[in-house]
Image (cartoon, rainbow, N blue to C red):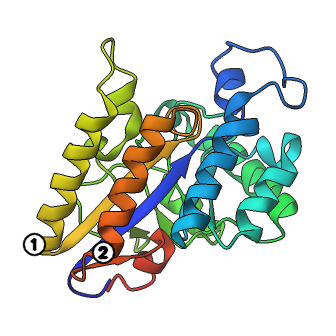
Amino acid sequence: MTGGAVACLSFDNLGEAAEIGAGRLAAALAPGLDRSLAEGLPNLLALLARRGVRASFFVEGWNGVQHAAAVAEIVARGHELGCHGWLHERWCDLDAEREGELLRRATEALTRAAGVRPVGFRAPGGARTAATERLLLELGYAYDASLGEGMTATRLPGGLAQVPFTWAGVDGAWYLRPAPAEPEAVRAAWLAALDRVAGRGGLFVLVCHAFITGLEPARLAALEAVVEAAQRDPRIELRMLGEVAAEVP
């Protein structure tokens, strides 16, 4: 990563995969019934196209089978594909054998759907296991984007690049509270964080979701305001996570 300030947009989850993984749905919904896929994802893709920005999408491998066209569209629009488990399992609770099985299965399914291999990984729930880095290296991943120590791109003990996030940059940490934050408050908090990074240098990473931000016009507007501010600020460069990872010493 070069010096100065870098802002990255990332998006987690696709369709109803997490609902099935959590046992809240027994099977895939009929086409068009999952609003996050039918409305939320198109809204996010339209926002990114309108702003001319490329982002990193972390997708559950199950979607490579059930929603292959949506996975392929993300890549066709110039965005970066990452893996987010198979069915959004609580990743940190997996043993190494099960973790390896799910990661290989997800990687293969996403590759078939998109025609390219996922380059990054973000652990569902945020936390890796002791085996995650080794498994990612074995499968040729370029970076991990799970929780980290502070907001600095670095390398994990085995040498894999890490571009971390913090909960303050996650839409769900604001909007999924018992009393959800107002979009104006989230916008203000993210703009303040962006300005701090612009002033001192470093990394600003947002993690948004189609079912949280993508379905609400006011939340979409708050996100777009942050993107616009990053584009206007000459101190900030907008990049995909994989581009940042490629420059980690």
Which amino acid type is shown beneath numbered disc 1? Gly
Residue appearing at x 29%, y 25% in the figure: 181
- Specify the quadrant of the image occupied by residue 13: top right
Q: Residue 61's x, y, as percent?
A: 73, 46
Q: From the image, which quarter does the C terminus lie in?
A: bottom left
Q: Earlier in the sequence, mark 1 or mark 2?
A: 1
Using the image, tell me which numbered label, if any, was put on residue 99: none
Q: Secondary structure at mark 1?
A: helix
Q: Which residue is mark 2?
A: 232
Quarter location, residue 204: bottom left
Given this view, does label 1 or label 2 mark the residue nearer the observer? 2
- Mark 1 is surrounded, within 10 Å at the Cα level, by few (under 14), some (14 to 19) or many (20 or more) other residues, namely few
Q: Is residue 18 left or right of residue 37?
A: left
Picture residue at 56% right of the left edge, 36% below the top: 95
Q: Which residue has dot 1 on it? A: 199
- Name above or below for residue 1 compared with residue 134: below
Q: Residues within 10 Å of mark 2 (few under 14, many from 20)?
A: few
In the picture, the quarter occupied by the N terminus is bottom left
- Of 222 and 73, nearer the camera is 222
Residue 215 lies, in percent from the top left, at 58, 33
Determine the secondary structure under disc 2. helix
The residue closer to the viewer here, 115 or 235, is 235
Which residue is painted at 40% across and 42% down in the image? 127
Circle 1/circle 2 CB separation < 8 Å: no
Q: Please name whichever residue, 10 or 106, is drawn nearer the observer in this view of the structure.
A: 10
Kind of residue sitting beneath label 2:
Arg
Query: What residue do we see at 26% from left, 42% from top?
Result: 168
Estimate the x, y position of residue 35 in percent, counting from the top left. 71, 29
The outermost residue toward the right is 30
Q: Is residue 113 visible?
A: yes
